[in-house]
Amino acid sequence: MSDAAEAGPRHRAADLVVFAHALLARAGVADDMAHDVAAILVDGDLMGHTTHGLAQLAGYLGEIDKGAMGKGGAPDVIASRPAAQTWDGRRLPGPWLTLRALDVAAAMAQTHGTGTVVIRRSHHIACLAAYLKRATDRGLMMLLACSDPAGASVAPFGGVTPVFTPNPIAAGIPTHGDPILLDISASYTTNGLTQRLYRDGAKLPHAWVQDAAGRPTDDPAVLFNEPKGTLLPLGGLEAGHKGFALALLIEALTAGLTGFGRADPPEGWGATVFVQVLDPQAFGGRDAFLRQAQWLADACHAAGPRPGVARVRLPGERGLDLLRTQSAQGIRLHPSILPALLPWAERLGVPPPKSLAPG
């Protein structure tokens, strides 16, 4: 979180869920959908993903207002086998669709060892890390990936023309203790962070983007001023072939498996989604899986740190620590979030959440 967020007021997570739920419900979203979207967005903020939590809600409300996000109904199942399904999400709210896909894939996995649901024409699915613990708490492993076929901001390695979105991929791995929660993208940074920093007149921590001539820079303005630059693939100029390869894999898992992607006419902001759940019991056995995963976690924690590093942390460790702290003490929202939502609250007649008293 930013220094500004660290200094801001706190809000109870439950109050923020009620607030987000009410905004979505007043906008016409079905009650169960509104609840699931609110819960996933707030979980993103609980884990410190401040660009992909409630920061997305104003955009969602705008999409609902112009009819670009569905408000009710169900996805169409367009292909189904015992351990695999393909859905047309009908541009319904992405968090609701992804949670339903997780439940279906988990049921498949518990019967067949693995289950996969892919979704074409979903709307945006928010923070991928927010879904993972819902699988690992059941002793299951989860893989989640998405792309947005309507957007392009990442150049392939060696190029300056945008072809991909950041294409995040996430995995939840159960252990005997806290799960390992991976949430990365095939690009160095995200559209959400660069938009926020550009709006604030700030710079990136490193040269994670390139201008239209292919020169790396830490200035996000190159993405917004003509001629526009692009996000660099993960690995940058030195090893960006790795991020490029990862982006291609994610496109295959999402657009390829759903049969809907960049080769089709764009429909607007949204997502094509891959959800897979695996039950370790169906493979080498749950106890054996946990023994291996816990050994790795312990070995990484025991590894000697580099100079300037206090200790080795596992993916998701900081997010889980934040989740516990902010669940108990309240969430400090990024200072840009509530000002973007207050006009919607006034328009829809929803009282804003009360902040907690200091201390």
Image (tube, rainbow, N blue to C red):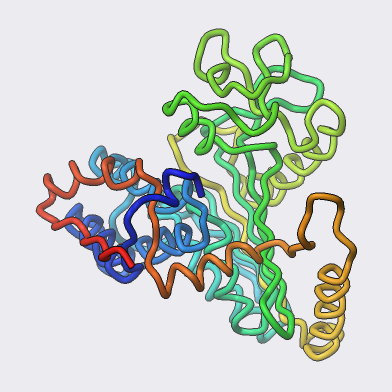
Residue at 43% x, 35% y: name it: 268
Relative image position of residue 354 (x, y in whole percent): 21, 61
Q: Does residue 129 appear left or right of residue 232 in this picture?
A: left
Relative image position of residue 288 (x, y in whole percent): 85, 87
Residue at 56% x, 20% y: name it: 223
Quadrant of the image containing the C terminus: bottom left
Q: Does residue 270 appear left or right of residue 256 in this picture?
A: left
Residue at 50% x, 18% y: name it: 224
Relative image position of residue 278 (x, y in whole percent): 71, 75
In this orientation, which residue lies closer to the viewer: 207 or 40? 207
Q: Does residue 261 appear left or right of residue 50 in this picture?
A: right
Quarter occupied by residue 20: bottom left
Say above or below: 3 vs 138: above
Say above or below: 8 vs 72: above
Relative image position of residue 44 (x, y in whole percent): 48, 59
Residue at 39% x, 62% y: name it: 331
Quarter occupied by residue 172: bottom right
Say above or below: 282 vs 249: below
In this orientation, which residue lies closer to the viewer: 245 or 319? 319
Q: Does residue 194 appear left or right of residue 111 in this picture?
A: left
**What count of labels does the image hold?**
0
Quarter occupied by residue 244: top right
